[in-house]
């Protein structure tokens, strides 16, 4: 199958995972075939995600499990971006972490001193915020106390929701909103729409023209614009066609029902 004329114009394709490549544990229709087609056409790929629940290695495993060939070098996670930011801070900073085991690992490998479960939890110098499935009120309490005592807040993103098979689930942004409301302080955002993850992907891919493909206007499309890249929107995640067609600042270069529809030229008889 041939690529659509749009895709022919780009050397690199930066693909969002949730809502674009998969929803929950299921690929969007035709996604593995579309990705294989991009590879066959010589396109370089990167997979980006604001979902902090898994490590880069776990994302590679999931991609292979659902039929998408991918290497660790191609996966750019918000957790890795957080680790990069933390590594630039003072070593052994007392840090309270809200997040999955992957985020704890990233914080530890960045040289932070994690104080969860200690008397220092509410006195941490830094709070790292990332969504996870076992959020407890005690985490919000300790983080709130630490921020009110002067701790800085670094967060994975502001995504309000993310798509799952049974509908939308609360994202990291919902936790960030609660902490910002409780403390009156603003978190520093590391993930999309900040351009850092896109720049990391491009550093790995090398020179060339790149297209960002995602399902969110507020993180994927806005992040592409922040990185000065073209962005396309697929409707297999959280954005409706009406919302996508109404976007103007920035405006997507294309709107498609799925990644497969965006990539694959329709054959005519």
Image (cartoon, helix red, strand yellow):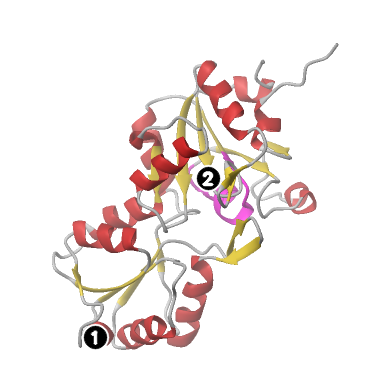
The residue beneath circle 2 is 17
Dividing the picture into quadrants, the one containing residue 146 is bottom left
Tag 1's secondary structure? helix
Of 52 and 205, nearer the camera is: 52
Nearer the observer: mark 2 or 1; the answer is 2
The answer to whether residue 38 is left or right of residue 156 is right
Image height of 141 relative to 67, above or below: below
**For residue 123, which numbered disc appears in the image?**
1
Can residue 105 be found in the magenta stretch? no
Cα gap from disc 2 to disc 1, whole angstroms: 36 Å
Tag 2's secondary structure? loop
In the rendered image, which quarter contains the C terminus? Answer: top right
Circles 2 and 1: CB atoms closer than 8 Å: no
Can residue 214 be found in the magenta stretch? yes
Q: Say which residue appears at 68% left-offset and 24% top-offset.
A: 264
Magenta stretch, residue numbers: 213-227
The image position of residue 95, as x and y in percent, is 24, 73
The image position of residue 88, as x and y in percent, is 21, 57
């Amino acid at each position: 199958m041939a690529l659509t004329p749009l895709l022919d114009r780009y050397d690199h394709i930066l693909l969002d995972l949730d809502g674009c490549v998969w929803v929950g544990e299921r690929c969007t229709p035709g996604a593995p075939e579309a990705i294989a087609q991009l590879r066959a056409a010589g396109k370089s790929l990167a997979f980006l995600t604001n979902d902090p629940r898994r490590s880069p290695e776990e994302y590679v495993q999931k991609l292979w499990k659902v039929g998408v060939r991918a290497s660790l070098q191609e996966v750019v996670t918000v957790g890795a971006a957080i680790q990069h930011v933390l590594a630039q801070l003072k070593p052994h900073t007392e840090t309270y972490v809200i997040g999955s085991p992957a985020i704890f690992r990233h914080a530890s490998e960045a040289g932070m001193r994690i104080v969860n479960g200690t008397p220092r939890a509410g006195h941490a110098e830094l709070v790292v915020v990332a969504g996870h499935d076992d959020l407890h009120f005690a985490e919000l309490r300790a983080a709130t106390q630490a921020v009110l005592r002067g701790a800085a807040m670094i967060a994975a993103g502001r995504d309000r929701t993310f798509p799952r098979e049974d509908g939308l689930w609360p994202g990291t942004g919902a936790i960030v909103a609660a902490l910002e409301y409780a403390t009156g302080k603003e978190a520093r955002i590391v993930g999309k729409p900040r351009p850092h993850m896109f720049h990391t992907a491009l550093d790995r891919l090398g020179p060339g023209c790149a297209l960002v493909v995602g399902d969110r206007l507020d993180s994927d499309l806005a992040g592409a614009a922040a990185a000065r890249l073209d962005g396309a929107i697929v409707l297999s995640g959280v954005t409706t066609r009406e919302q996508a067609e109404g976007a103007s600042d920035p405006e997507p270069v294309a709107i498609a029902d799925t990644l497969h529809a965006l990539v694959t030229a329709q054959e005519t008889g």
